[in-house]
Amino acid sequence: MTKILSVFSFLVLFSTLLLVVSAQQCGTTTPTNTVQWSLVGSTRVLNTNGCPPFDWSDQKTPNLAYPHTTSVTFPVTPEISTTPTSYLGLYLDKAKTTTNPMVPLGPIGYSRYGLLLYGNSDALFRDAYVYEGASFGKCGGHNDGQNNYHYHSVPNPTSAVTCVDYLESTTTHSPLIGLMLDGVPLFGPNGDGGVPPTNLDQCNGHTDTTYNFYHYHAQPNLQYPYLINCLMGCLTTSSGHLTNLGCTPSTTKYDYTPLNALLGITSVAASSSVAVATSSVAASVSAPVTVYASVPASVPASVPASVPATASSMISTARSSNMLAPVSSVMQTVPMFIPTR
Ligand SMILES: [Zn+2]
């Protein structure tokens, strides 16, 4: 009898554990995304649980999406440097001629729905889009070994009704994808008039008529570097896993006030200087237009481990005498080295 009881209590305990674990998973048919943007003094704060606002269950890694509640701080008014402050990808240049000796792993930004944006490297320093694209779901992302849903490239606008994170038009400037860790906003690949800009700098940034503040564009047609190549915004301590090459402030200053509305921050309290926006999932574009190639159908059979060689003493020097404090809410929840990305 005692044995039966203990088996029974074990089963109860086990099923309770299963219930607890399964209850934590991000929702699929009923998404459980929570995201909140707010202004606190000179900082812009993102609070997110990292769960997609759509059904992520069609992504093809064996990993799941679990909530990772985190708070990330960005400057409200990013200061732009005259030279890149950090390189984000496998190469120092968009033409892929010089390898980046210090490829950062982990987040390089966050979508407006609080989902992680990763660089173009997988954990083995290979092109993540080429080697992992086949595992992306319909919305363009997948889960890593820590069960974080994330993107390596432009969130897929072809399933706009359910993906909601990104909608595209051929007549107007691309919508906001999110913020990079320097606080500079990232838009889709199209500039004024719905065509890819021709005046992007080496990082993929510019200003245009639609948005007269320095901003990034994702690379058109899902070409390398997919999102952006480097940061031009001066870095703060909220980006401790990035190499900080230092900042030479540009004399040109920008007004980032329009970014509040793009993030859903509709009212800024004058007295408290704290504004709060909650996650309203807007899907107002009626006829999204696909402008991208499809993801690779299969992962290449051979797997070259092309770990970038030392190519830039500038980066190495900056890394060894890193002026960044390794304190980051990002790093508390997202490890630098992620087994399966
Ligand atoms: Zn633009």
Image (spheres, rainbow, N blue to C red):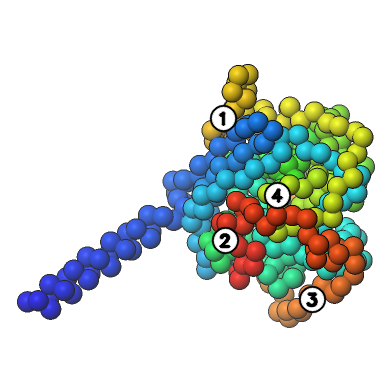
Q: Residue at x 71, y 31 (%)?
A: 259
Which label was assigned to residue 237?
A: 4
Label 1 element class: strand
Vertical arrangement, residue 160 with respect to residue 208, above or below: below
* Residue 285 can be seen, yes or no: no
Disc 2: which residue: 143
**Could you give the CA–CA distance between mark 1 and mark 4, rounded to whole angstroms?**
23 Å
Which kind of residue does numbered mark 1 sit on? Val
Residue farthest along the left direction in this orientation: 1
Across and down, in percent, residue 87 comes to 82, 57
Which label was assigned to residue 320?
A: none
Q: Nearer the viewer, residue 96 or 78?
A: 78
Q: Nearer the viewer, mark 4 or mark 2?
A: 4
* Residue 47 can be seen, yes or no: yes
Disc 3: which residue: 306
Label 4 element class: helix
Which kind of residue does numbered mark 3 sit on? Ser
Which label was assigned to residue 276?
A: 1
Q: Quadrant of the N terminus?
A: bottom left
